[in-house]
Image (tube, rainbow, N blue to C red):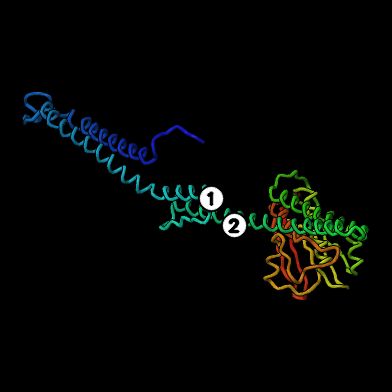
């Protein structure tokens, strides 16, 4: 945005300092006149019969007062310029850092030293903003690179299958169509997951009163055939846990958590427990499942996009694209909530979602 040129902050402060000194000097001279000189007799006898009189005092005092006023003005300009420069030096560093950040250099930090004041507080806030911005940009770049890689894989497989069909017309077309359908379905699922993740990150969605207990029951009912197929016991417990948010996104969050708990479980005889409850002004959803032991360093990476722990990879028809918990994390964050993942001592995972509650 182009603006008309104006006075710099340093010059404005300098003029303010000089003007303040000039006004203070004028007030001082006025006080001298009002409370001293006006009581001196203006006659030839002077004060108590002793000279000088008011006329002589005024003509003697006026030149000295003019010199003092000129000195105050010059002193105010020079001293104000130096003081303003010293006071505004931190602001110059902050401006330079902002300019570098605007040019794309997010690694620069101000790290202003000294005791806490307004400029140091602004500097620390700006450094904190740059930390978050750099982390967000790096995350977005990593996400874009991973998404491109994941989308390229099904496209490359489709092209390879088509090349094989073109070079070998006698190949079984039914098998080819089936494989192409599976690859295309996976690409569509990945694209929809990316769109949902982006929507959750933006946070611009309609909100309403949502009961997490109802969403948990619906997700359990939908995924019960999958749980029975894997011989896993699925239980839903607890009571109402209301929050203000998007019913569609929160339903996807609960479904992802329950499906994730079923898929990454014991081969048979495992359990999944979904519990909802309200704690004061917080609505809590927990999803606990049995499974293999998970190292803490692996659990901390599960919410990152496209991160699949080697102990949690599935090769069957329910293998994911590595976005399940990333989508959950994005939805929870968009609803001003928190997501906690903790490995269970006996194996498996305990996921706890805390969202702002509503009456």
Residue that protrudes farthest toward the top in the picture: 43
Whole-number angstrom distance, CA of label 2 to CA of label 1: 13 Å
Question: Is 121 situated above or below 79?
Answer: below
- Place of residue 163 in the rendered image (x, y in percent of width and height, measured from the top left): 82, 57
- Place of residue 28 in the rendered image (x, y in percent of width and height, measured from the top left): 24, 35
Q: Residues within 10 Å of mark 1 (few under 14, many from 20)?
A: few
- Place of residue 47 in the rendered image (x, y in percent of width and height, measured from the top left): 10, 30
Element under disc 2: helix
- In this orientation, does residue 105 appear? yes
Question: Is 35 situated above or below 221?
Answer: above
- For residue 317, side relative to residue 329 (left or right): right
Front residue of this view, candidates 44 and 167: 167
Q: Residue at x 84, y 59 (%)?
A: 164
From the image, tell me which residue sits under label 2: 135
From the image, tell me which residue sits under label 1: 104
Is there a contact, CB below 8 Å, between mark 2 and mark 1?
A: no
* Mark drawn on residue 141: none
Quadrant housing residue 268:
bottom right
Front residue of this view, candidates 106 and 111: 106
């Amino acid at each position: 945005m182009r603006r008309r040129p104006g006075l710099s902050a340093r010059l404005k402060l300098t003029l303010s300092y000089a003007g303040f000194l000039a006004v203070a000097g004028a007030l001082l001279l006025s006080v001298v006149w009002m409370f001293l000189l006006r009581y001196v007799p203006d006659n030839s006898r002077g004060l108590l019969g002793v000279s000088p009189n008011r006329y002589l005092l005024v003509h003697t005092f006026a030149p000295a007062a003019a010199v003092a006023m000129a000195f105050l003005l010059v002193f105010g300009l020079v001293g104000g310029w130096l003081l303003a420069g010293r006071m505004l030096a931190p602001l110059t560093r902050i401006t330079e850092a902002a300019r570098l950040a605007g040019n794309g250099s997010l690694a620069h930090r101000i790290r202003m030293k000294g005791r806490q004041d307004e400029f140091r507080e602004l500097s620390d806030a700006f450094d904190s903003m740059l930390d978050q911005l750099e982390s967000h940009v790096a995350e977005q770049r990593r996400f874009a690179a991973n998404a491109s890689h994941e989308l390229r894989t099904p496209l490359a497989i489709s092209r390879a299958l088509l090349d094989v069909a073109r070079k070998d017309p006698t190949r079984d077309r039914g098998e080819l169509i089936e494989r192409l359908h599976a690859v295309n379905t996976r690409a569509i699922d990945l694209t929809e997951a990316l769109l949902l993740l982006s929507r959750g990150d933006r946070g611009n969605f309609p909100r309403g009163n949502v009961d997490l207990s109802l969403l948990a029951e619906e997700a359990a009912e939908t995924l019960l055939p999958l749980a029975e197929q894997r011989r896993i016991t699925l239980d839903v417990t607890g009571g109402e846990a209301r929050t203000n948010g998007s019913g569609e996104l929160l339903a996807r969050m609960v479904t992802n958590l329950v499906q994730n708990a079923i898929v990454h479980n014991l081969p048979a005889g495992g359990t999944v427990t979904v519990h909802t409850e309200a704690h004061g002004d917080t609505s809590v959803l927990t999803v606990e499942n049995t499974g293999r032991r998970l190292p803490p360093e692996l659990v901390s990476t599960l919410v990152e996009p496209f991160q699949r722990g080697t102990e949690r990879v599935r090769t069957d028809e329910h293998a994911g694209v590595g976005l399940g918990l990333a989508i959950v994390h994005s939805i929870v964050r968009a609803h001003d909530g928190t997501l906690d993942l903790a490995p269970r001592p006996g194996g498996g995972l305990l996921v706890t979602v805390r969202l702002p509650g509503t009456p």
